[in-house]
Image: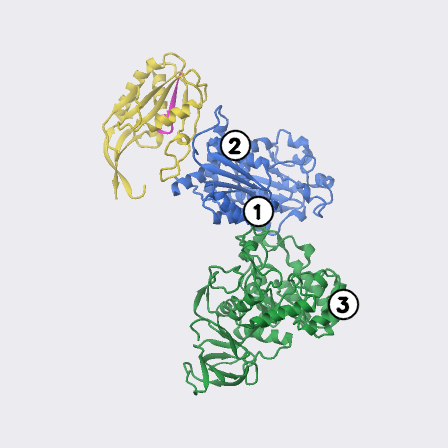
Amino acid sequence: MPGTRRVEKRILMDAAALDAALDRMTEALVPLVAGGRSCLVGIQTGGAHVARRLLARMAARGLPAPPLGVLDITLYRDDTFLGLAQPVVRHTDVPFELNGMDVILVDDVLYTGRTIRAALDALVDFGRPRLVRLAVLVDRGLREYPIQADVVGTRCETTAVENVQVEMTEMGNATDRVVIYERESR
Amino acid sequence: MSSARMNHLLGLEGVSREQIQTILDLGREFKAVGQRRIKKVPTLRGITVVLMFIEPSTRTRISFEVAAKRLSAETLAFTASSSSLSKGETLLDTAQNLMAMRPDVIVLRHAYSGAPHFLAKNVHAAVVNAGDGQHEHPTQSLLDMFTMQEKKGSLDGLEVAIVGDIRHSRVALSNMFGLTTMGAKVRVAGPRTMLPPYLDRLGVRVFDRIEPAIEGADVVMMLRIQKERMGKDLFPSDREYARVFGLDETKLRLAKPDAVVMHPGPMNRGVEITPEVADGSRSVILEQVENGVAVRMAVLYLLSAHLVEGA
Amino acid sequence: MRTRLANCEILDPGKGKRFWGYVEWEDGVITAVKRAGPGMVEAPKDIEVIDGHGHLLVPSFVDLYADFCEPGNEQRENVATGSTAAAAGGYTTVCVRPDTSPVIDGADTARFVIQQGAACGRVEVRPLGALSKSLAGETMAEIGEMADAGVAGLSEGDHHVAKAGFLRRCMEYGANFHLPILLTSEEPSLVAGMAHEGYVATIRGLKASPVAAEETAVARHVALCELVGTPVHLLKLSSAAAVRIVRDAKNRGVPVTASVTAHHLLLNEESAADWDPNAKVWPPCRSEEDRKALLAGLADGTIDAIVSDHAPRAIEDKELEFDLAVPGASTLETVWPIVNRLVAAEEVDLRTAIQALAVFPRRLLGLPGGTISAGAPADLALLDRAAPWTVGPSTLLSRGKNSPFLGQAFAGRAEMTVRGGRVTFARSGVR
């Protein structure tokens, strides 16, 4: 963004801590997906990566993996054109019938709740789930909408000038970690 | 992140490869939206799109209207013939009247070249050229390129033959600009009476006969022969045109075995294309129509993004 | 009373040399031309002195082809507004086109236009009489009566005479009255539209007219001129092909002469590239090679005159799609600025240009003058060559604001015009 730059403030989770958080989430998800009529829907792009990690862990435990969908919420955002940059539309792929499903919506960071609001709008355009749960790797607080997660990897206190970034190797990062950056006005 | 900033879409002349690719990529996502049960997204709520068609074209108007509605934009259709408009009222008068409706985007189809450019200079709205005279028809070319990319993977090095009335075809001109920008190799063929001068400067190869033009082609695009051009010394008869310049299954065998056949519509079956080819397995003509909605959604999305940012 | 225009750089195109000095006249006739250093404005008490401020002084311009739109289209221009624009461009005589409404095809209309011009008095307005009644190309107009009424020449305006045989008869009959015949040249069956058929028209989807449309018509006109043996002037050539035909005809002794507009010397097909209706002129500005050939034709004497082809148009004629806009440009006030720019760019020789603007047109029409010497009429134009100004609705005095140069800056324009010893135009600050 013009006029501002980002500085690394602190590391919220290193690779080991992230691994442990994903384990805890998997643990918590097992009973939620036990019914068989369930699926994971990851929000592009961070949530989709977290969802794939969770599915891999379930498979490693020999559990039947629920189907995975990915959802891009750009076309449903309430601030599509308010940002400075042109919002990039990413791929949406929900390759199964959503009607009557238990949907576990997965995102990397839960912040204002607006993304989840948009995701719920997008989701119902694909069908009518029986219920929707929310799983997030990081809940950083500062909610603006009445939305809460059912499964949380870790919680932390942040301020509005901070930016919580989940970095994973499949996104091209050298190592897995969660970093808190701070925006500085120049 | 913003790779395809556009104020207007007036033509493909001068539009970069990166910008075209952005529109085509975006078109893929919008095509997926159109294939859902609920084919509508709320993205352009509150945006007003005026469909100003000063030359009748039901197909293009409906395609834009569907595109705008799938993005939740408001649409206003304004249809008139240029003959009734040109009596006393100038194009500027018309444009200023339209501005009273405060449109964000004006989609203009017009019988005369340059009319969208005139409008763009004189109104405060994004202008999309939906075909101007014998100049350009950029969204048609974008949907053609979208279809080619979908069928062939990449446009780079693709051999595309465009056959027919090149001189009076805005589809041909936009495609010559767009395809050469994207690295495709364009060949054109048609009666010399329907070829404009200096095509070589556009980087296309010109053939007198259809056969060498479609030999080894990946894509064969047939252009519509306007009925009103017949009997105006441009070619002797539609019978001869069909025989010499029309596409039939025998001629199509000269193209690559997996070549696709395209036509911007509406077709004159039996003149520039035989029904067997038009309805045959190589024809992607109906897919072009579906893809048209997708790329027009992409164009409206990109233009609207600019409008709100610029506000 | 004697008047002296002092402190100017005098160029008499017939003599060629430029020198500093002053010109004196009395009763409309030049009485003295003297050398004097720059800045010399002192004179005896009984002489009225005008300071020329070091500007260029030349014989006033004579235009062979302009449209004053009267009678019939006074919303575009009338004889008075056109005369004002002409005087502001350095002109003292203007020949106006016959394709008015009604057509100038008889003595009455011709007299009416002459009288309108005389009433305004800024320039001598001389109609060109039509060759055919109503410009229909079928029946000969009353050429003899128009000659007696004072038409300057005969012309079918921007209309094409379809029948070569009819044109031949008109040329023969016109010769009886020693009237020059001025023809525009375009074979209409080759024309699809009013852009030059070339690369720009191809990529901008413009309906176009090929060089051959002009070329075939020029060749026909040259052949008829040779056949009849009376002078024919070919107006506003636009192509290298037309220049070549005229050059060849002149070399063979055919009594043909030719002109070009100032804007065709400056602009090429690119001027229509953005569909600017104000750049829609007829014939179209063609390729850069054509423009270069027109410059060469002017330099070697193939082209004799520079005409304005002044064609003022109303807003409703121009705020339109390119194909629908009425062709024509308001040009009388930009001819000298264009020529001056071309001189500065060393594309045109100054003396050649003044000959084409002031000397040849007088010769064609049989008018005296075209020289700055004692005994010649005091018809003079004082031209600035440097001061910047911008073409715009407020800087053009013509009612037609349809200039292809709107918003463009030029250096220099006509500062003062003297006709028969009377100042018919002076830009504020000069006097």
Inspect the magenta stretch and tell me whether residue A41 lies in it: yes
Residue ID for mark 1? B135
Judging from the image, what secondary structure is the residue with disc 1 in? Answer: loop
- The alpha-carbon separation of the residues under discs 3 and 1 comes to 44 Å
Mark 1 or mark 2, which is nearer the start of the sequence? 2
Q: Is residue B230 above or below residue A47?
A: below
Same subunit: marks 2 and 1: yes
Give the amino acid type for the residue marked by disc 2 in the picture.
Val
Around disc 2, counting alpha carbons within 10 Å, would you say few (fewer than 14), some (14 to 19), or many (20 or more)? Answer: many
> Can see residue C329?
yes
Magenta range is A38-47
- The green-coloured chain is labelled C
> What color is chain A drawn in?
yellow
Q: Quadrant of residue A26?
A: top left
Tell me if C55 is positioned left or right of C352 in this view. left
Q: Quadrant of residue B177?
A: top right
Inspect the magenta stretch and tell me whether residue C307 lies in it: no
Q: Position of residue A31 (x, y in %)?
A: 33, 13
> What color is chain B drawn in?
blue
Around disc 1, counting alpha carbons within 10 Å, would you say few (fewer than 14), some (14 to 19), or many (20 or more)? Answer: many
Q: Please, which chain is the residue tagged with disc 3 on? A: C
Find the residue positioned furthest to the top: A35
Give the amino acid type for the residue marked by disc 3 in the picture.
Arg
Q: Please, which chain is the residue tagged with disc 2 on? A: B
Q: Which mark is residue B66?
A: 2
Q: Which mark is residue C169?
A: 3
Give the amino acid type for the residue marked by disc 1 in the picture.
His
- The alpha-carbon separation of the residues under discs 2 and 3 comes to 65 Å
Judging from the image, what secondary structure is the residue with disc 3 in? Answer: helix
> Can see residue C179?
no
